[in-house]
Image (cartoon, coloured by chain):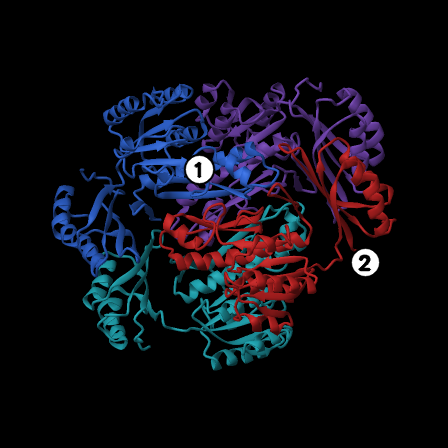
Chain colours: A cyan, B purple, C red, D blue
Amino acid sequence: MVFENNKHASIVLLITCSDRKGLIAAVTVFIRERNGNIINLEQYVDPNENQFFMRVEWNLSGFEIGVDLFEKRFQEDIAIPFEMTWSLHTSDERPRMAIFVSKYSHCLFDILSRYQAGEWRVDIPLIISNHPDLESAAKNIGIDFHCIPVTNKNKAEQEKKELALLNEHNIELIVLARYMQIISDDFIQHYPNRMINIHHSFLPAFPGAKPYHSAYERGVKIIGVTTHYATAELDGGPIIEQDVVSVSHADQVEDFVRKGRDLEKVVLSRAIWRHLKRKILVFNNRTILFD
Amino acid sequence: MVFENNKHASIVLLITCSDRKGLIAAVTVFIRERNGNIINLEQYVDPNENQFFMRVEWNLSGFEIGVDLFEKRFQEDIAIPFEMTWSLHTSDERPRMAIFVSKYSHCLFDILSRYQAGEWRVDIPLIISNHPDLESAAKNIGIDFHCIPVTNKNKAEQEKKELALLNEHNIELIVLARYMQIISDDFIQHYPNRMINIHHSFLPAFPGAKPYHSAYERGVKIIGVTTHYATAELDGGPIIEQDVVSVSHADQVEDFVRKGRDLEKVVLSRAIWRHLKRKILVFNNRTILFD
Amino acid sequence: MVFENNKHASIVLLITCSDRKGLIAAVTVFIRERNGNIINLEQYVDPNENQFFMRVEWNLSGFEIGVDLFEKRFQEDIAIPFEMTWSLHTSDERPRMAIFVSKYSHCLFDILSRYQAGEWRVDIPLIISNHPDLESAAKNIGIDFHCIPVTNKNKAEQEKKELALLNEHNIELIVLARYMQIISDDFIQHYPNRMINIHHSFLPAFPGAKPYHSAYERGVKIIGVTTHYATAELDGGPIIEQDVVSVSHADQVEDFVRKGRDLEKVVLSRAIWRHLKRKILVFNNRTILFD
Amino acid sequence: MVFENNKHASIVLLITCSDRKGLIAAVTVFIRERNGNIINLEQYVDPNENQFFMRVEWNLSGFEIGVDLFEKRFQEDIAIPFEMTWSLHTSDERPRMAIFVSKYSHCLFDILSRYQAGEWRVDIPLIISNHPDLESAAKNIGIDFHCIPVTNKNKAEQEKKELALLNEHNIELIVLARYMQIISDDFIQHYPNRMINIHHSFLPAFPGAKPYHSAYERGVKIIGVTTHYATAELDGGPIIEQDVVSVSHADQVEDFVRKGRDLEKVVLSRAIWRHLKRKILVFNNRTILFD
């Protein structure tokens, strides 16, 4: 990583470690001594796990140390003594994101609309689908589209192709935009906390297939959607965001689908935004969300 | 039932039957012919069950038929031919309601506050608890309070006492205001769709004990509460109302409890209000809620 | 209008008139006598204005009267005696809708996504903008795009061009999808209750320009958006839908814009959907919304 | 202030000053050097005002300095050099709160229910009303109740009596629980940012009298409530919390009142809770709310 000369750019440092006295002092003094001006600091201590989490952001402008040196010195002086897990990012980054999609277009179209409007700092070089239906939407804006149909029989082989494409495009983040296909544990382990799924229920209610049908059957008065990082347990990964909408007895399954669709696309995009802003840490299958 | 001479009073007719042509015409013509002025009519046809539901309300003033005659004629002319299940109510009624409570005071205090302020048209002659803690709150406003501790061993016997008290006080509606005791199927069958429970989760997620703890464990970002009519299946009865509140990673179980408490009392009271206003029908373990 | 032979099609009748006894009976008997099976009936009586509103929908299949005859007979037998204002629609209709847009793309892209996905029964033959920026989005899916820049000086002349285009395309409904240009009263009067605007505040708070800036200045904790039918009074027309999202002290104006954008597009589309479903009546600058 | 020997007690330090480099480092090092274990730190920099805000909380247990010395040393070593405004609190405090009320009971009853249940760490020695109606509610739980009727003519004189009572009871925080009487600027200046009001509208919409009536007139689809610190400008003070509830065309003013009542009491209590937890700072008529 090279710190660019963007006056408005900032550096984000994400840290987690066991809690102990002096953590915040140590980090903020380290930044202060290199003339960093902190513009945002959020921390959280999980009292049950005695685990410390912090996101601190400071102006790149005026910061008196190159990134290589920063990484070396921070690692030696702070991270090793405190046994920290940490990562460093700059607001100038453009993470590379791939989208997996099937036939439903609403989440994909919503993401592409934001992409075209420049809402996010991201590159989207690759869309993978198990159906050909949405190819033209991808091609229209110059994104590589690969149709890779998956059956129980060919899944291992097809996932290899997918992984090759992801590697080739240097993908950091995968978004499952209503991708209707269960992904193997093996595949998932290549993208730990880097594969965002949208599930169309208020988890843990109604995991798995056809949650709107199940919600209708149960006669609920509110339906919801959940974004989470995909893990080996189906719809059991760390939850990022959830949101809900009211339904009435008069709403049929197709009304649940219609109302839910608007939630799905908005909540999925909120989770993507938060991931791209480096505002999520994961610990013990739970997310810490920074504002 | 005698129609009183209250100028502003109204009559509410609740109907359900298999759907067929001419239902609304038949009922509204019947009311029209007796000079009734309809002030509200809501109907719903369940397209899957082909079942018809209606709530129609008209002014008592000017209505040209006594209630006994109404019931006889409506039954013969309309209800029998259309095979309707129906009930008749007037806005002048004061249903008699009992409250079951344990140690948590927030739902009880909220109900009693509304009762004292005259928010609802209801009489509350009886509070039953398995603990003595809240006795003085009941006595202060002149409501009979009976402490009936329940163990697995004495449950059948104690429930008999409770049923006797309910009969003695001529109770129509029971409210379980965070009553922490499982009620027997036998008891429940005495009050079908007349026993409102508040469960402190967003059902069907987290039924049973300690839902806030389970929600915390799962790392959800929204918690909820559910009111439903108690049935033999624990937390499985027809849902009346649900509502939710956001939580963050920084909220501990005690914060879930604090935030949930406010929801519980408000949502329980909303369900009571709706029941008292005769705005609920139940069919196939689902509620039809009229506005 | 010709009733088509679509088995699943239905007829929607919208009625308003002064309230009096026998209205519902008269209409439902009229439908019953022609063998109509009502699948939905909603009515409302405004108690302050003594005004009656009804939306009734029945299956086209089996209905024993052609539309011309229906209109003639209903007008003579029911509408004239009761002094009704009414309109008749079928679920087979494809209303023709035009979009006015400026530079912000999010509402337009959202509408076009739904249009392409077939979410709504509508035709969109025309997009008018005072800027050229979004032309390619329109052209890509074959919609006529006309760039008509407007200044205070040329407004009358340009609006004439716009009206000519609208007439030429036989437009029934206009959607102002963040169109940043005040429309003349004269123009608005051509489309009474047929021009839907989205305003990015929780009206009546913050009408006019830069509502997010004003909301930030005031230090509100919730921001909102409002859809309404455009009237001569700026942001004063009958409100269709509103929705809100929480903000915190840490949210800057650009965060208000980001959060508000998602609300704007979803709430605008909800209002369009409701209009297209013939679920809105307007009276005294207020909307009656049917479910 | 004396730091008590409560093992679970914590110290809260609230700070605001102009932003500059090294603020967080200076404060956290100061705490670290006295062996303080920070359990929560939240900070915010207002980028427009270049103003820094911080709430930091650490365990009292093990903290190696008495409070008098802390105050002296912190003032000299940190606060003066950085030109800070600051305050120190412990979780063991019991702030003294007075309630002003008129005839509506719902907010008062809600506060007293929480008080009796021990939800908050607070003492409520005094209730003042301009009407006698709610006296018994206060007396029942042993709170002094003073009925002080106010007219335009006697306002100055009556407010003097009120101030005397507030001083006598050593009141720190005043809650206006639907107190229907405009308070003089002079009075308000005695309790800057220490007098919480609940206004029954979504401010800045509908300030002043009868907001539910105005909301009905305007035909809004959502109503709201707002808590704020009272200032000289009526309903213009810094907003603490807001919340909303949906209404429909069928809801009359009395329905707005019914729905709003539930919001009012819950949102007012949330603001009180947050104030008592020392989670609010005020700057330029805006609140910074810590989680």
Q: Where residue A239 appears, x then y in whole percent?
A: 47, 58
Residue for badge 1: D266
Q: Where residue D17 appears, x then y in whole percent?
A: 22, 52
Label 1: which secondary element: helix
Q: Quadrant of residue B36?
A: top right
Distance from disc 2 to disc 1, alpha carbons, whole Å, reads: 51 Å
Q: Is residue D44 visible?
A: yes
Examine the rendered structure and indicate whether residue A121 appears above or below residue D224: below
> Are the residues flagged by discs 2 and 1 from a single subunit?
no
Residue at 27 percent of width and 38 percent of height: D192
Which residue type does callout 1 highlight?
Val
Crowd around label 1: few <14 · some 14–19 · many ≥20 (10 Å): some
Q: Where residue B84 appears, x then y in whole percent?
A: 79, 34
Examine the rendered structure and indicate whether residue B3 appears above or below residue D96: above
Disc 1 is attached to a residue of which chain? D
In the depicted view, which residue is nearer to us: C200 or A229? Answer: C200
Q: Where residue A79 appears, x then y in whole percent?
A: 27, 67
Residue at 50 percent of width and 24 percent of height: B117
Examine the rendered structure and indicate whether residue A105 appears above or below residue D142: below
Q: Quadrant of residue C174?
A: bottom right
Disc 2 is attached to a residue of which chain? C
Please state if C212 lies on the left or on the right of C188 as rendered. Answer: left
Please state if D23 lies on the left or on the right of D133 as rendered. Answer: left
Circle 2/circle 1 CB separation < 8 Å: no
For the N terminus of chain D, give its image quadrant: top left
In the depicted view, which residue is nearer to us: C290 or C227? Answer: C227
Q: Is residue D62 visible?
A: no
Residue at 55 percent of width and 75 percent of height: A127
Residue for badge 2: C6
Please state if D5 lies on the left or on the right of A214 as rendered. Answer: left
